[in-house]
Structure formats: C-alpha cells, structure tokens
Image: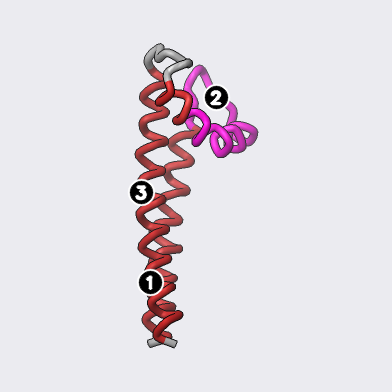
Amino acid sequence: MFLLSNFLLALAKLINVVLGIYIWIVIARAVISWVSADPYNPIVRFLVQVTEPLLSRIRRFLPPMGGIDLSPMLLILVIIFLQSFLAPTLQQLAQSLR
C-alpha cells in the first residue's frame, strides 16, 4: 500500500504545482489583455491558446459586463478552490493508506 500512498502524494503535489502555474498564466493573460500586445508574438499566442478554452466556457455563463471581463477572476477562484480541496484530499487519502 505504500506504493499507492507515495503515488497519491506525488500526484497531489503535482496537481498543486500545475494549478499554481496555471494561475500565473491566467494572470499574465489578463494583464496582456489590458495592453495592446502583438497577437503574433509567440508568448501571447501561447497564453491565449492555453487559457481560451476555459475562459470561453466561463464567458458563456458570465458575459463581459460594461466592458469588464470577470472570467479570469472566476477561473482563478475555481483554481484556488481546486488547490484547497483536491490536493489536500489526495494527501489525506495517501496518509490514511500508510
């Protein structure tokens, strides 16, 4: 069982790190949307390609209001919830398997 426990601990840490990096990517995308960045810049294209699938889904339910797009903020809140719920749950599950 220690093998499964170690796997779950590693998975929890990986999920936490990936979600943390994704938060910064969403923040970078929001900042870039405030300035007129070159849409052909590879960094800008990467940020748009990585974040647009989730942001467009949120925009279907929460359209921009008065020129303000709240979808990045909502996405960050969802990611923080997942970091607060999913990673500790996996860690506790792994600890109980030991």
Query: Which residue occupies the foreground of this view, 61 or 43?
Result: 43
Name the quarter where the C terminus is drawn.
bottom left
Which residue type does callout 1 highlight? Answer: Leu
Q: Position of residue 35 (x, y in %)?
A: 37, 15
Q: Residue at the location (61% across, 37% down)?
A: 57
Graded by Cα atoms within 10 Å as few (under 14), some (14 to 19) or many (20 or more), the crowding at tag 3 reads: some
Which residue type does callout 3 highlight? Answer: Gly
Name the quarter where the N terminus is drawn.
bottom left
Q: Earlier in the sequence, mark 2 or mark 1?
A: 1
Report helix, strand or loop for mark 1: helix
Which residue type does callout 2 highlight? Answer: Pro
| Marker disc for residue 94 | none
Q: CA distance from mark 3 to mark 1?
A: 17 Å
What residue span does the magenta drawing correspond to? 48-70
Q: Earlier in the sequence, mark 2 or mark 3?
A: 3
Which residue is denoted by mark 2 in the rendering? 64
Which residue is denoted by mark 1 in the rendering? 9
